[in-house]
Image: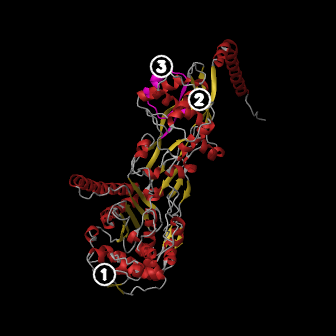
Amino acid sequence: MQRLIKPSRLLIFLAVFIVSMLIYVVELYKLQIIEGEAYYAKNESSQVTKVVAPAARGNILDRYGRVLVSNSACNNITIDTTDLFAQEDPNAVILQLIEATELYGDSYNDTLPITKDAPFEFTDMTYLQKSMLEAWLKANKMASDATAVEILSRMRSRYDISNSYSAAELRKIAGIRYEINNRFNINTTDYIFAENVGMGTLTYLMEQDVPGFDVTTSYVREYKTSYAPHLLGYTGLLTAEEWEQFADQDYSLDAYVGKDGVEYAFESYLHGVDGVAAVTTTVDGVLVGTEYEKEPQPGNHVYLTIDIGLQEVCEEALSSHIDEINAERALVNENAEKYGTESEEMISGGAAVVVDVNTGEPLALASWPGYNAATMLEDYEALVADENAPLYNRALMGVYAPGSTFKPCTSTALLAEKILSPTTTLLTKGQFTKYIDDGYAPECWIYSTYDGITHGEINVAQAITYSCNYFFYNYGDRLGIDRMARYARMFGLGEKTGIELPEVTGQMATPSYKEQYEGIPWYNGDTLQAAIGQSYSEFTPLQMAEYCAALANFGERHSASILKEVRSYDYGNVLFERESEVLSRVEADDETFSTIKYGMWGVVYDQASTLTDIFLPLSVQVAAKTGTAQRGEGLKNNAMFICYAPYDEPEIAIAIAVEKGGAGATLAPLAAEIVDYYFRFKSSTNALEAEMTTLK
């Protein structure tokens, strides 16, 4: 019978086992007996602290995967409040920290809405700043109308700020004490004093042996583009008010959250899950080791519907146009001051929006004036003080009378309600005299501009092409305001667009609106003005772009959702993918829309058009409508322009609004530049989109 185990192998196994045990016993004896006392002393002289390991925020990308916002590692200075308030004079420590950051050009967090220099006055406050100050005043039993000087005086006593500190030093110290106090109304949590500080500041603080602060590693948002600031938004430290919103989402007390724009709208996707790290240090503060108890999980990546190349073109075209016009008007105003002639208003703002006709997706949302998103917080006071309100997103929040760009909507209602047919003609007379006995007889623009000339006998398509006010006074009066408003709602005018960002809905002029906000009845003249896009009608540029897309799309209006896709932090999984959503359909047949679209084609290519030379060089044909919205006697009109292209197979729709821009036709070169870019670079963007698809 053959043995299963040979004696030689058994002996080898026993020898290896015995040697291993001897090594183990020797090492154990060395650790516990010989070096045990040293290790015990080392253990006693070190401490382990559990800290939050912040997760990297997800990236924001455009529709083709071009990164717009990402992260970069940074050093933050945090105030250890327990250590700080154990100091003999914590205010002196705070002043040292402030002076160090100022010395090396770093900024620190101070949202106290009082000017930094005497005479101390309130700065323009955000809603959050106002609510925080009101809470502080209430907690400190001060009147809500207390002056800035009175508040600082109360802070001097409240925070034991010695009279030896100057007024300027008082303001600096008070700002940080206010921040620490307002974080969560407790003084036992670390407070992020300064973010993304340079090595100069850190080295100086360490050399000066300043107590009460720690240096932590985190992430700061890095903007890869200088465009789309109103769209992208920004992040900031979680506030006490926001803590209630995120308390059940496992956010740390020092979490960064989206404050505006895409950063705010898609916070749930972008914000990762923080980890927990055990940090071991000696009593002297020397780092011994770091061990993750819970690894941080980065946030997910958000892809927008925006094409950043197209966004850039829109912003540059808008800015160049406005700068050129303002330069001309500035020269006029210089001469007006010299010679006592009439001056002109300067353009104060504008917006340009491009949407996909077939999906409703915004491809560009440009607002002028803009700002640098990367330095927005540092520039905040100057931006708020700017009379042109650069922080104001005019593409979504600005509302403007549509002027004649509304006439295609009126025409849709007229045709759909069978008040006229595509072949119905009207002999226009220039002045509409039906209500002359009531003292109201509005005139067509051509009648008053060219001394009694009329548009003659025209049909509805020609009325759109020539923008004949008389035609729309006549038939708008027959249509009535209720039916006119119903079709405006179908087009989404005065309605929410479906975008995830804050937007103003504006309003369609109606008797109920006038009664509610003006307290006076509706007159027949109001209906006539509403028919040509005046009266109380005001819409956003995004609404106007989606309205134009619906005209091009035979009445189908899509959601303007800006979220195209969400991918996991490793880009491996698609967590969300946008599907086109129809919000409404205009109740009209294809012949109606074909007639209106032909009228818009005539705006550009009719033999009498002044726009033909602008659009003729393009590779596609364009259908458009101009609008000049009156603002009142002696005031410069707002300029409006909508168009879509190509005329026969529409892909994009554009809306441009310029405050005090004058005639809508002056915006045609901007639209042509945008259309030209889109179709010249269409093949390259298609390649980008195909590349993006293969990554899924």
Within 10 angstroms of label 3, few (less than 14), some, or many (20 or more) residues? few
Up-down: is 312 above or below 541?
above
Q: Disc 1 designates what residue?
A: 455
**Residue 174 % position (x, y):** 52, 31
Q: Disc 3 designates what residue?
A: 208
Within 10 angstroms of label 1, few (less than 14), some, or many (20 or more) residues? many
Q: Disc 2 designates what residue?
A: 158
Q: Of residues 463 and 359, which is closer to you in this image?
A: 463
Q: What residue is rendered at 27% in x and 80% in y?
A: 453
**Residue 555 % position (x, y):** 48, 74
Q: Earlier in the sequence, mark 1 or mark 3?
A: 3
Q: Quadrant of the N terminus?
A: top right
Secondary structure state at the residue bearing disc 2:
helix
Q: Is residue 195 magenta?
A: yes
Amino acid found under the numbered disc labelled 3: Gln
In this view, which residue lies farthest toward the left? 339
Secondary structure state at the residue bearing disc 1:
loop
Q: Quadrant of residue 43?
A: top right
Secondary structure state at the residue bearing disc 3:
loop
Q: Which region is colored magenta? A: 192-220
Up-down: is 279 above or below 672?
above
Residue 567 in sight = no
Q: Is residue 391 magenta?
A: no
Up-down: is 577 above or below 107?
below
Residue 570 in sight = yes
